[in-house]
Amino acid sequence: MRKKVTVVGAGNVGATTAQRIFDGGYADVVLVDIVEGLPQGKALDMLESGPVTGSDSSIIGTNDYKDTAGSDVTVITSGIARKPGMSRDDLLYTNMDIVGSVIEQVVGNSPNGIVVAVTNPLDAMTQHALAVSGKSRNQIFGMAGILDTARFRSFLAAELNVSVQDVHAYVLGGHGDTMVPLVGPTNVGGIPIADLIPKARLDEIVQRTRDGGGEIVALLKTGSAYYAPSAAATQMVEAILFDKKQILPCCVRLDGEYGIDGLCVGVPVKLGEGGVEEIIKLNLTSDEEAALKRSADAVQELVDVMNNRKS
């Protein structure tokens, strides 16, 4: 029997995530959106691609969360996207309301399911979803580090003209300007990246990684990234459904790990059928620890804003 995956939000990120999962053929998919006809039309279009892609999975679009009942994994992408000149912080209140409403419906219909948050500002929305749901940190967590790391690896592979598969790296911290691309552990085929790229150029690549989402927003002018984000979300879904025990950077609430307590930020985790099954502790340099602390402080500022609003 195939697993069941719900994707909330039929915009670019959500629809592309649903398509990737449907094409894989390993799960039945429910695409949810508040706009009547939008998820139904996109889901029907995807369903009709099945004979071409070889997928026998089912996919339906709906405006009713009752159709999502019993989902093994739910991916939440709903919310407004960034526009040029808009920071992730500007999205806070609007997406806070959206995510809070969505999580109540999701948990009410799939109380035992795992939830992957994608809505920006990611770390704050993951924190809010976790608080509203009342679920444990292993069941609700966010997608960001995989995306940020993919950008970092892409830029490094292009710089060195090597396969992306040979570039091993992690980006930790909040999904924003303070994210922490780790240079120390980053290597290409086992060779430290600092031995391959001069520091000045490496600093430029690190900064481009931090600005990765904004670079795409500036180019598109009327939208934001969705191909890479949907690929990252799909990787998380597959790690869970196939119980891969894969080590991936995800946004999870830390309870003392890395010196951070009660806050959702990006760190490497072991991802399997139980969701976040383990927090992986990396040995960071003092500079990296300080940078991660600054990133966590930036997330805390958003959380404080949300808490003040709720009070």
Image (cartoon, rainbow, N blue to C red):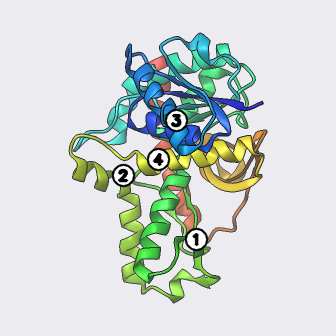
Mark 2 or 3: the one toward you: 3
Residue position for label 3: 18
Q: What separation in Å lies between label 3 and label 1 (alpha carbons)? A: 25 Å
Vertical comparison of 15 with 225: above or below: above
Q: Secondary structure at mark 4?
A: helix
Sequence-wise first label, 4 or 3: 3
Q: Secondary structure at mark 2?
A: helix
Q: What separation in Å lies between label 4 and label 3 (alpha carbons)? A: 12 Å
Checking the image for residue 229, the label placed there is 4
Q: What separation in Å lies between label 2 and label 3 (alpha carbons)? A: 21 Å
Residue at (22%, 44%) from the top-left corner?
A: 85
Q: Residue 277 placed where, x, y %?
A: 78, 45
Mark 2 or 1: the one toward you: 1
The answer to whether residue 141 is left or right of residue 121 is: right
Question: Within 10 angstroms of label 1, few (less than 14), some, or many (20 or more) residues?
Answer: few
* Type of amino acid at the residue the image marks with label 4: Pro
Residue position for label 2: 213
* Type of amino acid at the residue the image marks with label 1: Gln
Residue position for label 1: 165
Q: Secondary structure at mark 3?
A: helix
